[in-house]
Amino acid sequence: MELAKHTPWTRSALAALAALLAIAAPAFAADDGEREALARLAHEIELLEPLIAEAEMRADPAARVRFRYDWLRQDLARVRRGILDHVEAPRAEPRRVAPLRGDYRR
């Protein structure tokens, strides 16, 4: 299409549309990139389970202060679920999130 054959209004509309697409396309690409990175992060959290199981197996059951592996697993599952909820949602709505325990010692 030759731009010279169009009216000034059509040329302005086409220019505005082109500018909008130039701005929006990278935003969509960035959003996709973020979603991919978050999905990888959720996968990496899942891959921690064998390491946690190994550490738990090697723990001294007679130790005075013990690490709470069950709490760690619950917190990691909560973080992973939050990431996946964001990745899978068309638009994340603000919501209350249960606090992490953070302290893994008894």
Image (tube, rainbow, N blue to C red):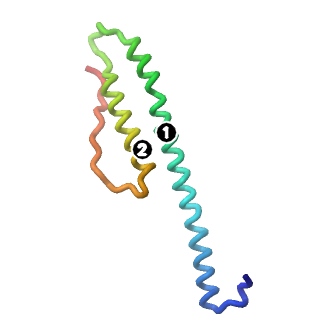
1 or 2: tag closer to the N-terminus: 1
Left or right placement of residue 93 versus residue 7 in this view: left
> At which x and y percent is residue 98?
27, 41
- Residue annotated with mark 2: 83
Q: Residues within 10 Å of mark 2 (few under 14, many from 20)?
A: some
> At which x and y percent is residue 27?
54, 61
- Residue annotated with mark 1: 41
Is residue 64 positioned above or below 70 on the image? above
Q: In percent of the image, x 38 and y 41: which residue is there?
A: 81
In 3D space, how far apart are the residues under numbered discs 1 and 2 (Cα atoms)? 8 Å
| Rendered image: mark on residue 58 | none
> At which x and y percent is residue 102?
31, 31
Give the secondary structure at mark 2: helix
Query: How many numbered marks, from 0 up?
Result: 2
Left or right placement of residue 50 versus residue 10 in this view: left
Kind of residue sitting beneath label 1: Leu
Contact (Cβ within 8 Å) of mark 1 with mark 2 = yes
Q: In percent of the image, x 29 and y 28: which residue is there?
A: 103
> At which x and y percent is residue 104?
31, 25
Give the secondary structure at mark 1: helix
Q: In percent of the image, x 27 and y 11: which residue is there?
A: 64
Is residue 27 positioned above or below 57 on the image? below
Specify the quadrant that holds the C terminus.
top left
Specify the quadrant that holds the N terminus.
bottom right
Is residue 81 positioned above or below 53 on the image? below
